[in-house]
Image (cartoon, rainbow, N blue to C red):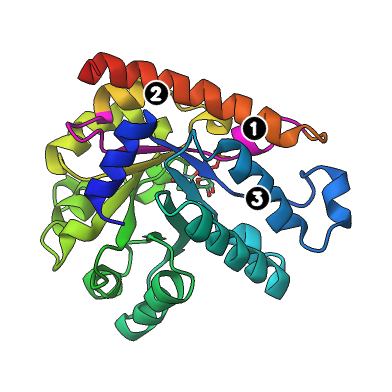
Amino acid sequence: MTTQHLVDQIHKKKSFLCIGLDVDLDKIPKHLLATEDPIFEFNKAIIDATHHLAVAYKPNTAFYEAYGLKGWQSLQKTIMYLNEQHPNIFTIADAKRGDIGNTSTMYAKAFFEDLAFDSVTVAPYMGKDSVEPFLNFKDKHTIMLALTSNQGAFNFQTKTVEGVELYKKVLETSKTWKNAENLMYVVGATKAEFLSDIRKIIPDSFLLVPGVGAQGGSLQEVCEYGMNDQIGLLINSSRGILYASKGEDFAEAAKVQAELLQSEMMSILLKKTGA
Ligand SMILES: O=c1ccn([C@@H]2O[C@H](COP(=O)(O)O)[C@@H](O)[C@H]2O)c(=O)[nH]1
């Protein structure tokens, strides 16, 4: 999917909501455990109930890898379902990959060609040659960790290296890489106070922003400091939507939570664009 297509979807749906599909078998309703593929059945019900409210879905691959081959098959069925039923929805494999060049090329093929995701998250720690193989894929997006939502972000990302905070160096340097127009960045909602500085370095890039809901980040603050002319934000919520109810009404309860976020987004968009 092109960036323009994503922007068009945001305006059409009046939403920049990304729903995280982090399926934990200990948290899903018990009646689903009797089905052939509980993870897929859960995802399908969530997608069916919320697809009109979201522009993106983000399965975190850890939640599938943890269940071995069966989990990977559930991931494959989920992405196929999204691509076939909802081709206008942006898909993110939250896999946080990155390795030496030839290995990164294989990761990129796995997520962009075999699974046909629109984007994948990568870690910047191994540098340019570990990220560029992902950037070679046309109309695919590489979402690089910049300033993460967790407390550990302060261990390295905000430390000063050669006079600049490391996360700023990551942003500045990555802008010079080949096909850098295919880059997006992860910035945690819990780090909203850093967004003005981040926007000075990457005014036009899309940001994937996890950390609202369960981690306590504020949607209003993220929008105030992080929104650009193209909106430029995908706000993720996973647990806050998926596990709103543990009962048979889980999909309806997820829809209610997604509606709350989408209606807040709609008012923010209305204020910004007047449309
Ligand atoms: O900085 C980061 C990067 C990734 N994540 C991931 O996003 C979701 C957040 O889930 P919630 O349940 O809404 O807290 C999850 O998959 C994380 O691994 C992040 O939280 N922060």
Sequence order check, earlier mark of 3 and 1: 3
Q: Amino acid at mark 2?
A: Met
Residue 54 shows in the view: yes
The residue identified by callout 2 is 265
Q: Is residue 126 left or right of residue 258?
A: left
The residue shown at (82%, 34%) is: 247
- Residue 163 inside the magenta-drawn segment: no
Q: Which residues are magenta?
A: 226-245
Mark 2 and ligand 1: say if the CB distance to the nearest ligand atom is below 8 Å.
no
Residue 237 on image: x %, y %: 52, 37
Compared to residue 219, the image places residue 121 above or below, namely below
The residue identified by callout 3 is 43
Q: Amino acid at mark 1?
A: Ala
The residue shown at (38%, 70%) is: 98
Classify mark 2: helix, strand or loop. helix
Q: Amino acid at mark 3?
A: Asn
